[in-house]
Image: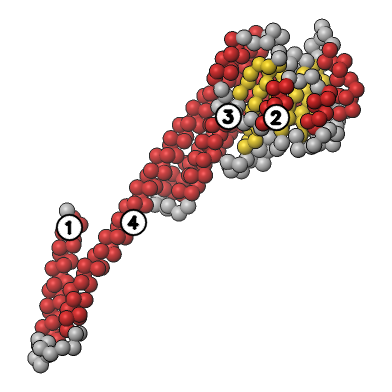
Amino acid sequence: MSIPYGAQKHGLICGYTFTADGVGQPLDSAEATQQFGATETRSGTAEFTWLHFDLTDASALPWMQQNLQLPEEYFEALRQGSRSTRIEIADDHLIAVVNDVAYDFSFDPSDIATLWVSVSDRLVVSARTHPLRSIDRLRQAVKRGDRFGSTVDLLNHLMRDQGDVLTRIVREATVRVDSIEDRLLSGRLAQQRSELGKIRRLLVRLQRLLAPEPGALFRLLRQPPPWTEAHDLDELRQSTEEFSLVLRDLAALQERIKLLQEEIAAQVSEQTNRSLFTLTMVTVLALPINITAGFFGMNVGGIPLSDAPHGFLVILVLVALFTAVAGWWAFRRRRE
């Protein structure tokens, strides 16, 4: 059975029930309403359920509160819109707040949204307000027939997908920075500062939102819920370490962008100084001409050389001489 994407009620984007072999079977909203209680309370089986909701549907949150036995901390995080990435324990559930990039990500800082996840031994509930890359990759993996042995295994896959998406973003940003650096070395500064500033703002926001809280993760790994398996915790720890490596690469790219911005600022300052020096040179060279023209244009009695037949030539030579002296002095100051 294949359920069209987004065609279900109560904001349910997709639902899957995972059998003992780890393969997900599609679950619609009507089946979730009628059968979920039995699935949740069933014991001695490896079955679990994943429900993914769209919070822009006004009926999604009331349906979740009425039909799903989720901890109050999860609904409180939804109401508060908490954006800090973390994984913590609440009433024997794992509450994960995951920040991810939008599906139509275009290197804009506003293309980052939040995914709220609740994980128990038999149920995974995820909710978002915007289409996100990582959760869509997880949904595609389930549709392909990938096997998931537990709810934590599903969460680990989501964390790995998020790490892969972030790695791709860092690579694309690195390519853009390489191109900007090449244009900078060739002397083309047009729009380079704005592009670097946009990329840097994006990376800063990604690092601030995607970096998991170390304290919450440490408490989780030290005192995990009793239903978690040791190998699942090891995979979660490994996923977190890989994610931290990507964040370090992101920080290194930010530092590189900062150095490029400083280099561009230095080049712009040098160009400004050259322009000011050229303007100063023109002013200095025109100073003797302006002073002489001012004195001889006052139209008062006693102007020298007014009756001399070669007066204009004498004044021209004097102006040229003073201009040459002023130019020599200005170029000498520049060399110094």
SS of the residue under disc 4: helix
Q: Earlier in the sequence, mark 4 or mark 1?
A: 4
Write down the quadrant of residue 326 in the picture: bottom left
Res 78 label: 2
Could you give the CA–CA distance between mark 4 and mark 1, rounded to whole angstroms?
18 Å
Q: Which of labels 4 and 2 is toward the front?
A: 2
Amino acid, disc 3: Leu
Residue 310 to residue 146: above or below: below
Q: Position of residue 127 (x, y in %)?
A: 73, 30
Q: Position of residue 21 (x, y in %)?
A: 80, 14
Write down the quadrant of residue 152 in the picture: top right
Write down the quadrant of residue 46 in the picture: top right
Amino acid, disc 1: Arg
- Can residue 214 be seen by looking at this rendering? yes
- CB of mark 4 within 8 Å of CB of mark 1? no
- Report crowding for label 4: few under 14, some 14 to 19, many 20 or more residues within 10 A (C-alpha): few
- CB of mark 4 within 8 Å of CB of mark 3? no
Could you give the CA–CA distance between mark 4 and mark 2, rounded to whole angstroms?
52 Å
Which residue carries the number 1 mark? 333
Q: Position of residue 151 (x, y in %)?
A: 73, 17
